[in-house]
Image (cartoon, grey):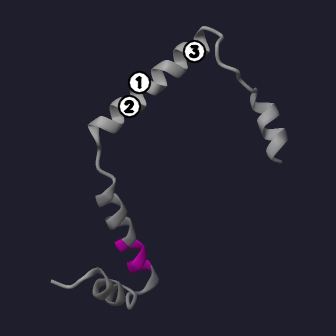
Amino acid sequence: MPNYEDIYHQANQLPPLEKLHLAELLLADLDTPDPEIDTIWRDEAQKRWQAYCAGELKTVNYEAVMKKYK
């Protein structure tokens, strides 16, 4: 079985569009759901939403953010 360096050198010979397609396939393969991480993010989102609704979370309006980063 070839190692990643061998595969890289072979893939590097591909035309740019085929390299892009290969990269997309590899990234999609890595993007698999993780129930543990999903649970952590769900809980965090719920805590933040509750804090926002209770007025415990400092917020900044859209215009202020856009002005700061223009």
Q: Position of residue 29 (x, y in %)?
A: 29, 59
Q: Secondary structure at mark 2?
A: helix
At x 71%, y 23%, the residue is: 59
What's the residue type where badge 1 is placed?
Asp
Residue to which mark 2 is pinned: 40
C-alpha span from label 1 to label 3: 12 Å
Q: Which residue is mark 3?
A: 51
Return the mark for residue 7: none
Q: Residue furthest top?
A: 54
**Magenta segment boundaries in residue numbering:** 17-22
Above or below for 47 versus 62: above
Q: What residue do we see at 42% from left, 87% from top?
A: 15
What distance separates the C-alpha of mark 2 from that of mark 1? 5 Å
What residue type is disc 2 on? Answer: Ile
SS under mark 3: helix
Q: Earlier in the sequence, mark 1 or mark 3?
A: 1
- Residue picked out by circle 1: 43
Q: Quadrant of residue 68?
A: top right
Q: Quadrant of residue 43?
A: top left
The amino acid at mark 3 is Ala
In front of the other: 4 or 18:
4
Mark 1 lies on a secondary structure that is helix
Residue 6 position, x and y percent, is: 29, 88
